[in-house]
Amino acid sequence: MSRVAMKGCRTLAAACLALGAVAGPAFSQAPPTAAPAGLSESVAAVINDEVISTFDLAQRMRLLIATSGIQPTQQNLPQFQREALSGLVDERLQIQELRRVEKEQKIEIVPTDSEVDEQLTEMARENNANLQQFTNSLAAQGIGIDTLREQIRAQSGWQRWVRGRYGSRLRIGEDQVKAEMERIAAAATRPQYQIAEVFIDAARVGGMEVAVNGAAQLVSQIQQGAPFPAVARQFSASPSAATGGDVGWITAGEMPAEVDAALEQMRPGQLSQPIPVRDGVYIVYLRDRRAGASAVTVSLKQAAIALSQGAPDAEVRAASGRLTDLRGRIRGCETVETEAARVQGVVAGDLGEAELKDLSPAFRTAVEGLSPGQTSEPIRTNVGLHILTVCARGSGGPGAVSKDQIEGRIYGQQLSMIARRYMRDLRTAATIETR
């Protein structure tokens, strides 16, 4: 399928469909996804006497392929099948529970056809299409609109019911907010990471070996261009899947130790390899990182002359004299490159921001007593002579978090926990037979 940039994708994964058929002819060149090999029109699963057919399963697999950005292969089709079947089972259980509640309490919870069509119309509008064009784009990939309609009905109805039943009952106490503020303050001295995640639940997919292999395939597909948010929405078992895997800022110690160890070695913009933990496998994308609040950070520029380690003393003295003269003409970071360009053999550059403790001993000694705008004496290293100009000094760590932000975070965590327990109880009580 064509890779068409999408905007305005909802938390509902099915919203992020590539509407290349609307945007131009490139989409029409991609044939509809073939039905997965080995599936016939029969029973795939029975959920409390309600049948999920292999046609339903094939349709959901096509939808997963279309929305994840992952190219189907013989290796990853079993993974698509597992995810498709798990999603269908959960949605059938949700709809069955909603119908039961409607009957007992004489209320309406399950979205009507008109309400579902309103959501479909909005999805199409956000992607510069009308509902008919949106439907046609699905059909071009062999996907019937009904498979998306029923996914929307189950997910939005379930969210409505859980929030309506439990959301108004949740009370976030002052003691909870205070405890969270104290935890944040205590953690402020440790490094923080802004991450997105995919978590493969080993128990859900059939064991740790399956989880590790599936995660490795997802990493490969992301590296080849599959959008991380789309992959997270479709494959992650974490609550963050609803936001495309976005976790926000975390502090070292909040994630499993194996994930912390990987993050410590990563740089912003890097994607991890699969990280096995006790109950599954993580894939982590590091968006950004920052030092703890107690760390001193410096932003530096340098001017340097390349010299071998065994350069003659006379050559070293001459280079030192040129840099000392240059140092006298530098007036803050904005003049480093301009002044350095006037001295033959000198190369200047921006070293960016770093924690003072992470600098080499020679560099750290040279700049730890300098204020912004000041330049060091020449520093000898194995590769040359350097002078460093301090552009800025500061402390690491995040800004203050408001009380409302903390309350919202706690509310979301508690509601998510309730929803997971609710689904766990439904699965435990249900009769689920897969064929």
Image (cartoon, rainbow, N blue to C red):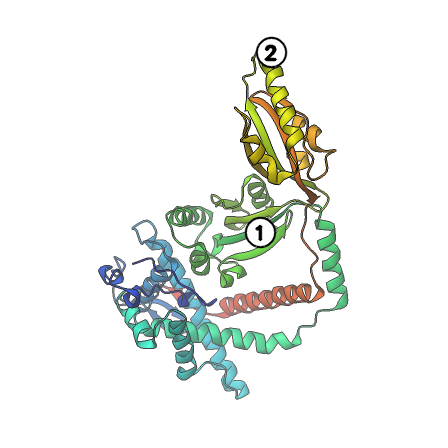
Q: Quadrant of residue 26?
A: bottom left
Give the vertical position of 144 relative to 389 (above or below).
Answer: below
Give the x, y percent position of residue 2: 30, 58
Numbered disc 1: secondary structure:
strand
Crowding near pointer 2: few (<14 within 10 Å), some, many (20+)?
few
At 41% from the left edge and 71% from the top edge, which residue is drawn? 126
At 45% from the left edge and 60% from the top edge, which residue is drawn? 233
Amino acid at pointer 2:
Ala
Give the x, y percent position of residue 274: 47, 45
Q: Nearer the viewer, residue 98 or 7?
A: 7
Give the x, y percent position of residue 300: 62, 37
Amino acid at pointer 1:
Gln
Q: Quadrant of residue 50?
A: bottom left
Q: Nearer the viewer, residue 119 or 261?
A: 119
Sequence-wise first label, 1 or 2: 1
Q: Mark 2 — residue? A: 314
**CA gap, disc 1 and disc 2:** 49 Å
Give the vertical position of 111 relative to 37 (above or below).
Answer: below
Labelled pair 1, 2 in contact (Cβ < 8 Å): no
Crowding near pointer 1: few (<14 within 10 Å), some, many (20+)?
some
Q: Mark 1 — residue? A: 194
Numbered disc 2: secondary structure:
helix
At 34% from the left edge and 76% from the top edge, which residue is drawn? 131
